[in-house]
């Protein structure tokens, strides 16, 4: 009898198993794969909240030793507007890393086994065992040679990806579900000079991106709306990506032409959904319970945070031999509170809509304000909640960084007067300003009238 069975041994599963095993619980970790083997199709980036978890768990030095440099700044360019800002710190951690995915998987899996989790590879889940009340009490599985396996546990955790078998077997329903919004292709370049920054570009409904990763390589990629994406031969993809950079950063495009791609093109397209992530005797973590578009490169970070969140919720109940139901319900509430704002922000970002004049003016003002610039990239990096960044007080302060004169356009000038020039004893003027700002900020305006929320690491 195990305390917990975890199905899926990659980022979220290994992290969950490691944390529970370190706390003294008997954990069985199952996976269909044989390790090391294969690799997740990911752009590898781990934002500061994920790095904070790796540091807490004593694994950051191992990750850094794989040959990936620290990244301290993220940037956005759209047309003539350029924003590059330092990442805000999360409990003293203000850097990102982009380790090779296979090596990160191995580091976490080895840590789980070292902590005492029992790993069984090449095992496929076939059925969940339940008692008379419908509570999940174990698993029925098969090895690669069809040998049956039956094991029991107080809790079964599905960490088996967006097409989770555990989720299917328990009938976990999706909600707030949205289709694939864009498709991307990316690969690795060698001998490409890079200054250790994440760069993203928004231009003509294209989202180009690049940052340094492991072994002196650089990730280079492009996301396009689904209707504009076409599968093509490698040389044609090379030309498409280089052309996209040519339009927004000719200097970087010239470097691409002078260097070489050293891996195949990888393609990604991910739907957006949340799943009900718990029930009697079971829970979902990582992509099994929540998937959002990869345009903000937050999948690994979300998986690390989610594992910690689940373990923090269930560990006291496991320790006290108490009913797990209240703990699992609390986990679900905390998970939704943690991810819902960034889930909506990512969906808006994933539409790859071109910025209008007012949006560009606001981004230009953010580039002039270190506080707002850091907040903007911190929102992309899942550090700053969108409702906090787009709170009325924060946006009103941004008007101090929009210069006077006719340059910003009449809409911005009018709203600036309502925010900064109208008599303070006329609160309706400020409320009108907020509605006007929201109406003219495209997707940015979505969060403006929301109540500010506390920052969650």
Image: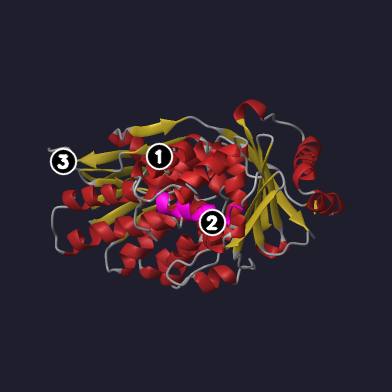
Query: 421 or 54, which is in the foreground?
Result: 421
List the residue tagged with mark 1: 164
Q: Which is closer to the viewer, label 1 or label 2?
A: 2
> Quarter of the image containing the N terminus?
bottom left
**Label 2: element kind:** helix
**Label 3: element kind:** loop
Query: 320 or 207, which is in the foreground?
Result: 207
List the residue tagged with mark 2: 400
Residue at x 67% of width, y 64% of height: 196
Query: 408 or 421, which is in the foreground?
Result: 421
Q: Position of residue 116 (x, y in %)?
A: 35, 67
Q: Mark 2 packing: few (<14 Cα in 10 Å), some, or many (20+)?
A: some
> Quarter of the image containing the C terminus?
bottom left
Rendering quarter of residue 129? top left
Residue at x 50% of width, y 51% of height: 298
Residue at x 48% of width, y 29% of height: 179
Is 317 within the magenta? no
List the residue tagged with mark 3: 131
Q: Earlier in the sequence, mark 1 or mark 2?
A: 1
Q: Position of residue 94 (x, y in %)?
A: 52, 68
Q: Position of residue 87 (x, y in %)?
A: 54, 63
């Amino acid at each position: 009898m195990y305390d917990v069975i975890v199905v899926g041994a990659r980022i979220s599963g290994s992290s969950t198993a490691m944390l529970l095993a370190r706390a003294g619980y008997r954990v069985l970790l199952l996976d269909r794969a044989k390790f090391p083997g294969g690799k997740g199709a990911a752009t590898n980036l781990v934002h500061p909240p994920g790095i904070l978890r790796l540091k807490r768990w004593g694994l950051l030095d191992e990750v850094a030793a794989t040959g990936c440099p620290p990244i301290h700044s993220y940037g956005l360019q759209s047309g003539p507007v350029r924003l590059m800002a330092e990442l805000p710190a999360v409990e003293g951690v203000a850097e990102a890393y982009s380790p090779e995915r296979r090596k990160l998987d191995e580091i976490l899996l080895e840590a789980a086994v070292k902590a005492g989790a029992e790993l069984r590879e090449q095992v496929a889940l076939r059925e969940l065992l339940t008692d008379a009340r419908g509570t999940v009490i174990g698993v029925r599985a098969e090895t690669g040679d069809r040998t049956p396996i039956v094991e029991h546990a107080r809790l079964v955790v599905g960490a088996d990806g967006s097409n989770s078998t555990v989720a299917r077997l328990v009938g976990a329903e999706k909600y707030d579900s949205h289709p694939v919004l864009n498709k991307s292709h990316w690969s690795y370049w060698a001998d490409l000079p890079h200054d250790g920054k994440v760069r993203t570009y928004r231009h003509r409904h294209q989202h180009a991106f690049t940052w340094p990763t492991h072994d002196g390589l650089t990730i280079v990629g492009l996301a396009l709306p689904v209707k504009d994406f076409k599968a093509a031969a490698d040389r044609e993809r090379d030309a498409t990506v280089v052309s996209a950079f040519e339009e927004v950063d000719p200097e970087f495009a010239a470097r691409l032409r002078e260097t070489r791609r050293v891996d195949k093109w990888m393609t990604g397209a991910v739907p957006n959904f949340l799943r009900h992530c718990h029930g009697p005797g079971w829970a979902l973590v990582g992509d099994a319970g929540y998937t959002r578009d990869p345009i903000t490169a937050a999948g690994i970070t979300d998986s690390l945070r989610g594992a910690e969140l689940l373990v923090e919720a269930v560990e006291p109940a496991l320790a006290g031999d108490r009913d797990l139901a209240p703990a699992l319900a609390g986990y679900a509430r905390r998970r939704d509170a943690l991810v819902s704002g960034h889930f909506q922000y990512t969906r808006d970002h994933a539409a790859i809509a071109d910025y209008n004049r007012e949006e560009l003016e606001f981004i230009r003002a953010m580039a002039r304000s270190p506080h707002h610039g850091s907040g903007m990239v911190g929102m992309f990096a899942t550090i700053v909640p969108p409702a906090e960044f787009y709170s009325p007080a924060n946006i009103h302060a941004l008007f101090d960084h929009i210069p006077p004169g006719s340059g910003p356009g009449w809409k911005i000038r009018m709203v600036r007067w309502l925010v900064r020039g109208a008599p303070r004893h006329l609160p309706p003027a400020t409320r009108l300003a907020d509605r006007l700002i929201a109406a003219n900020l495209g997707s940015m305006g979505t969060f403006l009238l929301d109540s500010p929320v506390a920052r969650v690491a």
